[in-house]
Image (cartoon, grey):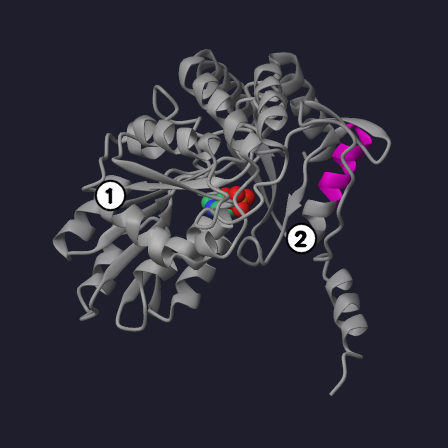
């Protein structure tokens, strides 16, 4: 057996309009970016609050690099756990109102680590069918009995929960769904968990910074403590504008992760300067509530504009505002048309989203202006209508 079929597999993928290309970004994340030598107005980053290129965040990063150097140098359990990491963990625990928080190097690793530290083949895991790939992978890798329930459907979850005799039951959901932008019905889901003695894990990668008065995400929005969301995941590469992730919960949960989460134990700690920069971005995310007000205004403006153009949006109150297209080739065609107008939005295709639901994943940021959203709407009128 050889690998001769790689080329033909790639050719098929191209034919199906599913081939993925990387573009080279030559500037920081900002509304105006330079990509492959050309300037665009971009609506596709997850830098929802405009913090990835914030001068205070950059300054903290530089100062900490002078103090700690660049590399973490070792895993947290050897000697890579710096004071910068420790201070950020304490600040995140306080921010989320949880007893403890634990840093991971990426959200993908936080999800793999948490699920696999808690579950094995004696257990059962229940996942929303539209969960992020890292959550689905985490559940499959754990060896627990893996079941998906219908999207955001507490009844569908209940019908599965009542049939299981597993030792531990873990229900796992995105807080804000990454490709649709809708918010999980966490109060109903958590009520089912309580009824069936299951734990709830919420990955709020896209909720932090966007939802809740202080940007505390779904947990703040629904006022849910660690007795309702036992495992709370936040990622730092989106609204926080930096990199990495955290898990927040009880003392026992965090100590269990330190003992057993393989993606925590067997990897180098994130650069301490990233932790120091995140401490500053956390302060901005929390205190500068105008960023959320601005986002809300832009979301309303965009939704009203699309409605009058007759474009199909999803039921999303968040900065993730996908325009549903359907077929992959059509999504690519619109994305290319927008590029000609100087607007950068990537087409999201299967397998990232279900077949036949290719879309343009428009994301808004507090750094966008009203005039820039207007420019997007005019380009959409020209290209997509
Ligand atoms: C982006 C994302 C992740 C992965 O986080 P990284 O820090 O980028 O690895 C996990 N979960 C969800 C829901 C995400 O959108």
Instruction: Out of 375 and 308, give the one closest to the viewer.
Output: 375
- Queried whether the magenta region covers residue 181, the answer comes back as no
- Residue that lies at the very extreme toward the left in this rendered image: 195
- Spot occupied by residue 306 in the image (x, y as percentages of width and height): 57, 27
First in residue order: circle 1 vs circle 2: 1
Q: Which residues are magenta?
A: 333-342
Question: Secondary structure under badge 2?
Answer: helix
Q: Is residue 164 above or below residue 22?
A: below
**Residue underneath mark 2:** 328
Q: Is residue 111 left or right of residue 68?
A: left
Residue name at image x 72 percent, y 33 percent: 344
Magenta segment's dominant SS is helix
Residue 175, quarter of the rendered image: top left
- Residue that lies at the very extreme toward the right in this rendered image: 37
Asked whether the viewer can see residue 130, the reply is no
Q: Quadrant of the C terminus?
A: top right
- Queried whether the magenta region covers residue 337, the answer comes back as yes
Q: Mark number for residue 251?
A: 1
The answer to whether the residue bearing label 1 lies less than 8 angstroms from the nearest atom of ligand 1 is no
- Spot occupied by residue 182 in the image (x, y as percentages of width and height): 42, 38
Q: Quadrant of the N terminus?
A: bottom right
């Amino acid at each position: 057996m050889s690998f001769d079929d790689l080329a033909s597999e790639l050719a098929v993928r191209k034919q199906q309009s599913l081939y993925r290309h990387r573009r080279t970004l030559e500037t920081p994340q900002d509304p105006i970016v330079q990509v492959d030598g050309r300037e665009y107005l971009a609506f596709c980053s997850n830098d929802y609050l405009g913090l990835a290129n914030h001068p205070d965040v950059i300054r903290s990063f530089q100062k900490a690099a002078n103090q700690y150097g660049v590399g973490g140098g070792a895993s947290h359990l050897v000697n890579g756990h710096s004071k910068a990491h420790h201070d950020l963990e304490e600040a995140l625990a306080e921010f989320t109102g949880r007893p403890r928080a634990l840093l991971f190097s990426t959200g993908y690793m936080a999800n793999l680590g948490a699920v696999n530290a808690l579950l094995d083949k004696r257990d059962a895991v229940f996942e929303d069918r539209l969960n992020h790939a890292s959550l689905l992978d985490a559940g499959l890798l754990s060896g627990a009995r893996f079941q998906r329930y219908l999207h955001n459907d507490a009844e569908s979850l209940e019908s599965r929960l009542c049939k299981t005799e597993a030792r531990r039951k873990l229900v796992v959901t995105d807080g804000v769904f990454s490709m649709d932008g809708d918010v999980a019905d966490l109060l109903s889901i958590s009520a089912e968990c309580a009824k069936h003695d299951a734990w709830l894990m919420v990955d709020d990668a896209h909720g932090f910074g966007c939802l809740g008065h202080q940007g505390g995400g779904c947990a703040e929005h629904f006022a849910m403590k660690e007795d309702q969301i036992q495992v709370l995941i936040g990622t730092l590469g989106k609204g926080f504008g930096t990199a990495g992730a955290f898990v927040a919960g009880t003392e026992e949960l965090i100590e269990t992760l330190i003992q057993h989460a393989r993606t925590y134990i067997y990897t180098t700690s994130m650069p301490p300067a990233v932790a120091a920069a995140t401490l500053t971005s956390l302060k901005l995310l929390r205190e500068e509530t105008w960023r959320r007000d601005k986002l809300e205004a832009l979301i309303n403006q965009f939704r009203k504009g699309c409605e009058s153009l007759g474009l199909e949006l999803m039921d999303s109150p968040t900065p993730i505002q996908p325009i549903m297209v359907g077929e992959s080739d059509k999504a690519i065609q619109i994305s290319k048309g927008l590029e000609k107008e100087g607007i950068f939005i990537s087409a999201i295709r299967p397998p990232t989203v279900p077949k036949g639901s290719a879309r343009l994943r428009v994301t808004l940021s507090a750094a966008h202006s009203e005039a820039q959203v207007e420019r997007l709407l005019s380009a959409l009128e020209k290209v997509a209508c």
